[in-house]
Image (cartoon, helix red, strand yellow):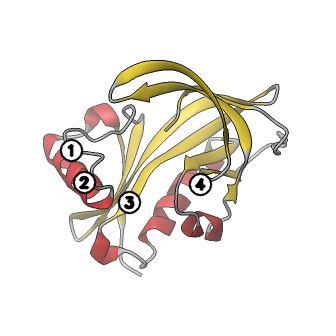
Amino acid sequence: MIELKMVHINEYELSDCQRSQIQSLLKDSFPGYFEDRIFFKQMSRERILAYSDGLLIGHLGLEYRAIKIGDQLASIFGIIDLCVKEEYRRQGVATELLRTVEGKAVANDINFCLLFADEHKLYQNSGYTLLKNDCTWFGIEECKSIGLIKERLTDCMMAKRISGEIPWDETHTVDLLGHLF
C-alpha cells in the first residue's frame, strides 16, 4: 500500500496550484469533460486530495446535503468525480478515499454516502449498493439551468448506509433537492 496523505479542503480555499493539479487529474481521468474548469455540473463543497510524496494522485469532491427518500429527509455525503492518477490505480488509493469519506460520515452522523457511477465494481467491493429509483433533480447542462428532471435511474446511483434506519428501496421516489452530482 502506498503511503498517503489525505488533505480535506473547502472548495473556496484551493490554491491556484491545487486547482491546476486537480484539473490535470480530472482531464486525464474523464477525457472531454473538464477542459476549462474543475467541476462538471457545480462546484463541490469540499475536496479530499490524496498525496503521495507530495504528488496529487487521487481526488474526490464532497457534497453535503439533505435529500428526500420517499417522505423522509436523509443527510448525505455525495461523492463526486473520484479519480486516481493512472499509474497509481489498483493500489488502494480509491478505496482509501472512500474510507476517508465514510469515516467523516460516521463522525458526523450522516445517513448515507451517495454517488453516481458508470463503473460499479470498486464501489460494490466497498459496500455500496446499486439502486433503482424514480428520482427528481435540478438539471444543469453546460453551466446552464435547464429545469426540474424526473427520471428512473437504474444503472448509476449507488449508496451506502452509514447511520440511521431510514428505509430505502425501489418503491421510494428520491428527490435530490438539488442538482445531480
Q: Is residue 17 above or below residue 128?
A: above
The quadrant the N terminus occupies is bottom left
Asked if the residue at tag 3 contacts the one at tag 4, i.e. Cβ–Cβ closer than 8 Å, the answer is no
Q: Nearer the viewer, residue 29 or 144?
A: 144
Label 3 residue SS:
strand
Question: Which of pointers 1 and 4 indicates the residue nearer the eye?
Answer: 1
Q: Nearer the viewer, residue 91 or 168?
A: 168
Question: Which of pointers 4 and 3 indicates the residue nearer the eye?
Answer: 3
- To which residue does mark 1 refer? 35
Position in image of residue 83 (x %, y %): 38, 59
Q: Amino acid at mark 4?
A: Glu
Which mark is on residue 83?
Answer: 3
Q: Is residue 74 above or below residue 146?
A: below
Q: CA distance from mark 4 to mark 3?
A: 17 Å
- To which residue does mark 4 refer? 102
Asked if the residue at tag 2 contacts the one at tag 1, i.e. Cβ–Cβ closer than 8 Å, the answer is yes
